Amino acid sequence: MPPSNPDSVVDLSLLGSVATVAAPLAIEDEVLLLFDRCGTSLQRYVTAFGLRTQESEDIVQEVFLSLFRHLRLGRSRRNLRGWLFQVAHNRALKHRGKARRLLAHTACWDDRAAAQCVDPGPTPEARLAQRQRRLRLTSVVRALPARDRRCLFLRAEGLRYRDIASALGISLGSVANALTRAITRLASAGER
């Protein structure tokens, strides 16, 4: 008996097999999971190439779209995190190269292009302050008594107090006192 409403008939041939429907969904879920796990760190990595936030977001989206295509074609799933960073690296370099070529062909001064070429390093004033701080700390370390200096160097290498005491042939209390004096002097020199 035919159904009373012809619109309620479902043509099963249009649904396709469950495997063909489930495979893209599984790939999509895998890509979304990788995006949740790696998206932020990938964007930080791409931004480190000197790109603006919007550009880095676009590149990250392109990378995950490439990943989706890569997986749909049945290509290797080995080390997908490494694959993501490699593709992001290549795209960021390509994008940066395009920006530089565009800047080289531009004859007039462009604030937007100039902002892309800003040195991401510290300012000259910050570099000078870092250098002065480093010199102060170095002079404090040189002025420390030999035992305090040796204890400090061994602690900086990761040795525990007991190991330092054993290595220098002194008591555990002497190591603690030497390190306290050294760290106190360094802290006061670092605050200036």
Image (cartoon, rainbow, N blue to C red):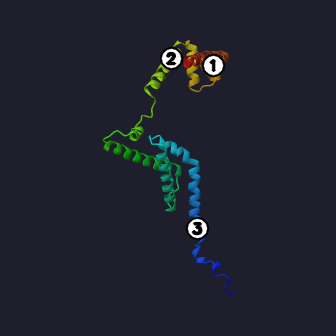
**Residue 7 placement (x, y as % from top left):** 63, 79
The amino acid type of the residue labelled 1 equals: Ala
Q: Which residue is mark 1?
A: 165
Quadrant in which the C terminus is drawn: top right
Quarter-wise, where is residue 162 in the image? top right
Q: Which residue is mark 2?
A: 136
The amino acid type of the residue labelled 3 equals: Val
Q: Residue at x 46, y 42 (%)?
A: 52
What mark, if any, has residue 9 been given in the picture? none
Element carrying mark 3: helix
Label 1, label 3: how far apart the Cα atoms are: 67 Å
In the visual, does 60 lie left or right of 173?
left
Q: Earlier in the sequence, mark 3 or mark 2?
A: 3
Q: Which residue is mark 3?
A: 21
Label 1 vs label 3, nearer the camera: 3
**Residue 101 placement (x, y as % from top left):** 34, 45
Disc 2 packing (10 Å; few <14; some 14–19; many ≥20):
some
Q: Earlier in the sequence, mark 2 or mark 1?
A: 2
Q: Residue at x 59, y 27 (%)?
A: 158
Q: Residue at x 35, y 42 (%)?
A: 103
